[in-house]
């Protein structure tokens, strides 16, 4: 990596952390200048606007989230074991999140859902990709006879993601993993109910 | 209500809607001036700071949420029917939310969870009160023999709230109630599993 590429990567990393903790509107270029030690020109040298940096930071954050999810899922072969691993990987979100500040997809969705914006579109794309991962795992599980044939893969995706995200929201609010632990146990029971016995 | 009280109530109502849609950091006093038709002095005549107005707007929004939840819950006698009513009332959050912008407790939690702030404390209090309502319903249901005796009321509160809030987040992101509908069906099955048969 060239020096310029290193600087750009560092801006993205610092910005991702700030945006994910404070929100895109509240985190200022001054905050990013302070975190990176760069002057304004040093930042705008790499990004034409705050929006362009925000999108790069979001993509970087989602990439870290996806790496963690895929890293967990691919260690298992059975469909339901894969989905349990996907749930379990979120138990660590309070003490050791992929990016400081919790789930960037939920945070970005909440901040931008009432406005037409490129970040809302990006959050939708990231959510689509997460849903599609779960849908593919369920459908493969049905084909392989691991999951009941009448299981609605779309429903499984919505239930897993909603419950995990709500659990992250509650655990972050109280700074206490207990809420994530409770939803993980409940989701295990839910996933067990989908098993073809 | 005096003219001054009416003006103050209108500022709170407009501010609650703006803060809930845009976030507290992004919604400016200029936005509130535009929504109310008041000059800056006309707003600061009633509130000493943006923070004071933000707290009043949050309390107002949570009050509307609670009215809707309690209105649904108190129409039922059986504990599990009460909890199903609590779930069902959220199906309307996309087309007819209590306050424009979705759930103010989740929105405020997401914006402030990484910062010490009065709004984070307020969001915790509102969340405590919602959890306690569910806990009381479950424990009364256990006493009355409607709910299995080994049911953990704290877990039921976490699972219901997490799943509902995550469902609101997904449905708002896609502007499609289908995600809330899916989680409602899943939570009905979960609540049925707690029934003392």
Image (spheres, coloured by chain):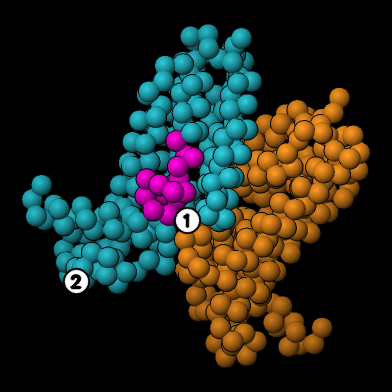
Chain colours: A orange, B cyan
The number of numbered discs placed on residues in the rendered structure image is: 2
Q: Quadrant of the C terminus of chain A?
A: top right
Cα separation, mark 2 vs mark 1, equals 28 Å
Horizontal placement of B135 versus A86: left or right? left
Horizontal placement of A107 versus B48: left or right? right
| Residue at 21 percent of width and 68 percent of height | B37
Vertical side of A7 occupied by A157: above or below: above
| Residue at 83 percent of width and 54 percent of height | A71
Question: Is residue A98 in view from this perspective?
Answer: no
The reply to whether the magenta stretch includes residue B97 is yes
| Residue at 67 percent of width and 50 percent of height | A93
User: Which stretch appears magenta?
Assistant: B89-104
Circle 1 sits in a helix, a strand or a loop, which is it? helix
Q: Which residue is mark 1?
A: B112
| Residue at 49 percent of width and 21 percent of height | B81
**Residue A17 lies in quadrant:** bottom right
Which of the chains bears the disc numbered 1? B
Return the x and y of residue B29 as percentages of the image width and height: 30, 69
């Amino acid at each position: 990596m060239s020096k310029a590429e290193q600087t750009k990567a560092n801006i993205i990393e610092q910005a991702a952390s700030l945006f994910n903790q404070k929100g895109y509107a509240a985190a200022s270029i001054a905050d990013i200048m302070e975190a990176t030690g760069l002057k304004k020109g040093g930042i705008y040298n790499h990004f034409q606007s705050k929006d362009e940096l925000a999108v790069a930071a979001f993509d970087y954050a989602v990439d870290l989230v996806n790496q963690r999810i895929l890293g967990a899922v691919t260690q298992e072969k059975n469909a339901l074991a894969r989905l349990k691993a996907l749930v379990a990987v979120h138990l660590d979100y309070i003490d050791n999140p992929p990016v400081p500040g919790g789930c960037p997809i939920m945070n970005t969705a909440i901040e931008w859902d009432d406005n037409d914006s490129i970040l809302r579109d990006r959050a939708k794309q990231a959510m689509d990709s997460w849903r599609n991962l779960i849908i593919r795992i369920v459908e493969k599980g049905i084909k392989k006879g691991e999951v009941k044939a009448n299981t609605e893969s779309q429903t499984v995706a919505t239930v897993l993601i909603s419950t995990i995200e709500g659990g992250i929201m509650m655990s972050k609010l109280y700074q206490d993993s207990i809420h994530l632990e409770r939803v993980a146990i409940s989701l295990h029971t839910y996933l067990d109910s989908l098993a073809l016995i």
